[in-house]
Amino acid sequence: MRFDYDYIIAGGGAAGLSLAYAIYREPRLRERRVLLLEPAAKNQNDRTWSFWTDQPTPFDHLLAGEWRQLAFRSPGLDVVRPLGRYRYATLRGLDFYRAVHAALAERPAQFTRLATPVEQLETTAVGAAAHTPLGTFTARYAFDSRPPGLERRPDRRYLWQHFVGWEIETDFDAFDPATPVFMDFRGPQHHECRFMYVLPFEARRALVEYTLFSGTLLPREEYEAALREYLHRELRGRPYRIRETEQGAIPMTDHAFADRSGPNIVHLGTRGGRVKASTGYAFLRMQQHAARLTAALAATGQLPADLTGDQWQFRVFDSLLLDIMQRRGEQTQRIFTELFQRNPVERILAFLDERTSWPDNLRIMQSVTPWPFLRSIVHLLRGRPGQRH
C-alpha cells in the first residue's frame, strides 16, 4: 500500500518536535517523509525546561544555563553540593522551537508542517490515518503527542505540579551564578509540598519559581504573594524588575498511560507517560524516548518491541511518593532533607532518573524514615490511594 507519508507526528510541542528532530539527525531515515501536524505555531517562550545529564544532548548549544553544583535548603539543612559527573541544564522553549523549526525547514521534501488540529488518529489495516479539518492523511506509523484525556481511576493518585515563575533582574549582585537552588523548603508548607526554585543565569538575573504539588491549583495572586515574600527576604527588601513570567500545571499521577493505541500509533510526551510521575521532569525523558524509537526505525524499519524501556520498580517508587504527597504533602520536605543529608547527589539524581541498580535503590530507601512509605505500601496493596485525615 502507498501511504501519503512514512510518519505522522500529531502535536508540535516538546515531544513531537523532539521526535521530528531525532529523525532529522538520523542519516538512515533521510528518505522518510514526515508530516508534522500542529494546531498553533510555537512562537513564544511559553516554558522553560530543566534537566540533569551526564551525556551530551543535541541541544547543548542552545542552553540558557548550565551548572555543576546545586543548593538544597530546608529548615533542617542548607547545603551546596557538587553534581559529580552530572550537569544541571536549562533550555528556553522558544530557543528550542526556533532551532527545530529551522532545521526541518532545510528539508522541505522530507518534512511537511501543517497548522491544523488532529481530530482523530486511527489504526488502519497496515498503517495509521490522521483525520483533520484539512483532510485525512495516511502513514505507516503515527506518533501522538496531543494532551491526553484522563478518566480518573479509584486506585490511582492524581495531583498537579503547578507553578508561577518570574525572571527577575536587579541593579546589584543578588545571586550566585554558579549555584541554582534545586529546592528551598523554608517557606510555609500548608500541609502540602511547596518550595522555591531558583535558576541564576547571571549575578543580577534569575528565574525564581514557586512550585507546589497538590490536588488543586491556587489563584494567581497567591503564587505571586509567595514570590514577593520570598524575594523580599532573599534580596533584603531591595528592588527588582520582572522581565518575564511563566505559569504551568503538570499532571502528576501514577495513572497507567498506554504507550500506544494500536500497533501503528505510538504515544509521546505526557500521553506516553514521559512525565516522571514523582518529579514532573520530562524533557530528557522525551529525548531518550525519541532516540529509542528512531534507532529502531533506522535499524529495522519497525518499532521496538519495548517502546519505553521503563522498569516496573520505579513506577512503584513514584506511586509511594505520590501517595505521601496526596495525604501528607508536608512530609515531602523531610523526605528530601533526609535524601540530601544521607546520599551523594549523584545517587539521588540517578535514582530520580531511573538509572540506579537495586543495591543503590536499597541505599536510597534505607536513608529515609520508613513509616510514611510503609503506610503507602499498605495503600498500594489495598488498591486504594491514601487520603488526608
Image (cartoon, helix red, strand yellow):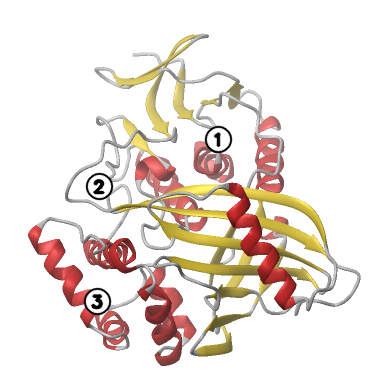
Secondary structure, mark 2, is loop
Which residue is more in the foreground, 73 or 345? 73
Which residue is more in the foreground, 160 or 303? 160
Seen at 74% across and 58% down, the residue is 167
Which residue is disc 1 drawn over? 30
Labelled disc at residue 256: 2
Residue 316 appears at what percent x and percent y? 23, 64
Seen at 65% across and 28% down, the residue is 41
Seen at 41% across and 65% down, the residue is 192
The quadrant of the picture occupied by the N terminus is top left
**Residue type, mark 1 in image:** Arg
Secondary structure, mark 1, is loop
216 left or right, relative to 81: left
**Residue type, mark 3 in image:** Pro
Residue 187 appears at what percent x and percent y? 55, 74
Please name which of the two marks, 1 or 2, marks the residue nearer to the observer: 2
C-alpha span from label 3 to label 1? 52 Å
Of labels 1 and 2, earlier in sequence is: 1
- For the view shown, which residue lies furthest in the right direction? 171
The quadrant of the picture occupied by the C terminus is bottom left
Reply above or below: 104 against 364.
above
Structural crowding at the residue carrying mark 2, measured as other residues with C-alpha within 10 Å and reported as few (<14), some (14–19) or many (≥20): few
Residue 336: image quadrant is bottom left
C-alpha span from label 2 to label 3? 23 Å
Which residue is disc 3 drawn over? 372
Reply above or below: 20 against 168.
above
Residue 232: image quadrant is bottom right
Secondary structure, mark 3, is helix
**Residue type, mark 2 in image:** Ala
